[in-house]
Each structure stands twice: as structure tokens, then as C-alpha cells.
Image: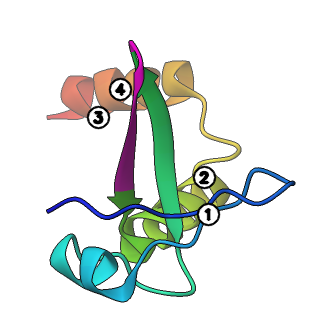
Amino acid sequence: MGVVVTIDKKGRIVLPKKIRESVEIRTPGKVLISSKGKKIEIVPIDTRLLRAKRIASRKLRDWKEEEHRGEKLLMGMKG
């Protein structure tokens, strides 16, 4: 499906509702925009994925892998 849209002076475009619905872009939301040669690709980003990433970053902030490997070795030596 192709639709002609206008680009304003600030470089903004409006994605038509039918296009957003067909690729499941929710508003408000986020999309990943990248260029492929002379084409632009817009990919919806699931907000649940972004939320999970924020939670994981916060919970794993002080994670030190070397501490956990040593703990596993000690646990193995006890049994």
C-alpha cells in the first residue's frame, strides 16, 4: 500500500491511520527509522519491549558477572 504524504518545514510527516493500523503502530508510541540506500524503513517498536528493557537495566545495574561465577563454583564445591 502506498500513500503520498507531505513533509513540513521541520521534516515531519504524518503516518496515515490505515498505514499505522496495518503495521500495528500504536500512538503514542515509538518507531525505529533507518535508511536503506535511498529508501527509509519505519519499524514499530513494541512499548512492552521498551518497558522490559528499562526494568532489566534497572534491576541489573549492579550486576557483576565475576561475582556470580565464583558463587556458583563455591556452591558446587559444597555438594
Residues at marks 3 and 4, CA–CA distance in whole angstroms = 4 Å
Give the mark nearer the N terminus: 4 vs 1: 1
- What is the spatial separation of the Cα atoms under label 2 and label 1, in whole angstroms? 32 Å
Drawn side of residue 25 relative to residue 64, left or right: left
Which secondary structure, mark 4?
helix
Tell me the kind of residue under disc 2: Ser
Looking at the image, residue 73 lies above or below residue 9: above
Q: Residue 75 carries which label?
A: 3
Is 19 displayed left or right of 54 in the figure?
A: left
The circle drawn on residue 13 is: 1
Asked whether residue 38 is drawn in magenta, I would say yes
Of badges 4 and 1, nearer the viewer stands 1
The answer to the question of whether label 3 and label 1 lie on touching residues, with beta carbons closer than 8 A, is: no
Residue at image position (44%, 67%) is 52
SS label for mark 3: helix
* Element at label 2: helix
Q: Which of marks 2 and 1 is in front?
A: 1
**Which residue shows up at 41% across the image and 18% down it?**
38
Q: What residue type is labelled 1?
A: Ile
Classify 10 Å Cα crowding around label 4: few (below 14), some (14-19), many (20 and above).
few
Front in this rendered view, residue 19 or 6: 6
Q: Is residue 76 left or right of residue 66?
A: left
Query: Which residues, given as a range, are shown in magenta?
Result: 37-43
User: Measured from the top left, where is residue 29 in percent x and y?
Assistant: 53, 77
| Crowding near the residue tagged with mark 2, few <14, some 14–19, many ≥20 C-alpha atoms within 10 Å | few
Residue pointed to by mark 2: 57
Residue 41 lies in the magenta stretch: yes
Kindly identify the amino acid type of the residue bearing the numbered disc 3.
Answer: Met
Q: Count the marks: how many?
A: 4
Which numbered disc covers residue 74?
4
Task: For marks 2 and 4, give the CA distance.
Answer: 27 Å
Which numbered disc flags the more N-terminal residue, 2 or 4? 2
